[in-house]
Image (spheres, rainbow, N blue to C red):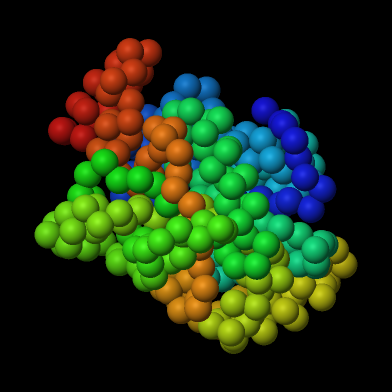
Amino acid sequence: MKSRARPHLWTIVLAGGDGVRLRPLTRALHGEDYPKQFAFIQGDRSLLQATVTRALRWSSPEHIVVVVAEEREALARAQLATFGPIQIVPQPSNRGTGPGLLLPLSRVLAFDPAAHVVVLPSDHYVRDEKPFERSVREAVDHSMVEITLVGAIPDRAETQYGWIIRSGGQAAGGDRVDCFCEKPPATVAEDLMRDGGLWNTFVMAGTIQRFWALACQHLPLQAARFGAYLDSVGTPEESLALQTAYAHMPAADFSRDVLERAPELRVVPLRACGWSDWGTPERVLESLRDQEEYAPLSERLALALAS
């Protein structure tokens, strides 16, 4: 579904991961170790197709950039062939979410220096798209100066998610982020939930200039390599320049190395929409077990996990 696309609003879809923890599920469904973003877990759409459909609610097809592993480029193009002129960018190797995000950011910067960017992971489940869209648009509205995250309101003291701690007191542009806590022990998670902590969805919005400035500040080596690459975007030298950029590219984690060091971040709470990070088979079962149409799938997955 496409609705109310803004002329400079881009979406980056992160689909370059290996999905190791979900392999028991994808193996049960497909008979092989399919990366989860390409698996058909829910209905007739893969997680990648569902994510791109989600992005089309606010970005036009030519303003959607999907980053995938180089060896999965053909599969991604086959799954997205009917979605219009979406940009599919293969990364030569997985060097973490730092380079994994800087690669599509550099392409957006090359095409549209005035861009505003939404970042979406490709392994999320959303039961109700409308409140999710409203939360993303709210984050976009609040991120004209600083990057704004979308944080899920917790319903349990989850120890396998990262948490966002707010500084207290609401600001006009969303709550200020005080700090992050990654996969806390149970007692800490209970305190975070009681004190208004949010789950970090890694959904965020900001101007391309702000994203790039933070990258240059906190990942200067990687940003310099991608800076050289972006000068070649759209030219015959682009492929060689990308391979050169990735040669001996240091790995980096965007959350740990950039967001946790950023001086000013904001966060908006995610409206109730049935969101889940489908990082494990158990989370998939949790999302689907109460939906009657997916009862056979839930039973099949439960048997696969028990075997």
Q: Position of residue 124 (x, y in %)?
A: 45, 42
Residue situated in front as seen by the camera: 129 or 140 = 140
Left/right of residue 116 with respect to residue 288 in the rendered view: right
Residue situated in front as seen by the camera: 267 or 160 = 267
Residue in view at x 31 percent, y 56 percent: 197
Left/right of residue 232 with respect to residue 223 in the rendered view: right
Residue in view at x 57 percent, y 58 percent: 173
Q: Position of residue 246 (x, y in %)?
A: 61, 76
In the figure, residue 200 lies in which quadrant?
A: bottom left
Indicate the quadrant containing the C terminus: top left, top right, bottom left or bottom right: top left
Q: Position of residue 219 (x, y in %)?
A: 55, 82
Against 28, residue 165 (above or below) is: below
Q: Is residue 270 visible?
A: yes
Left/right of residue 234 with respect to residue 79 in the rendered view: right
Left/right of residue 72 with respect to residue 105 in the rendered view: left
Residue in view at x 33 percent, y 31 percent: 287
Q: Is residue 16 visible?
A: no
Q: Farthest top residue?
A: 292
Q: Position of residue 105 (x, y in %)?
A: 67, 65
In the figure, residue 14 lies in which quadrant?
A: bottom right
Residue situated in front as seen by the camera: 63 or 169 = 169
Indicate the quadrant containing the N terminus: top left, top right, bottom left or bottom right: top right
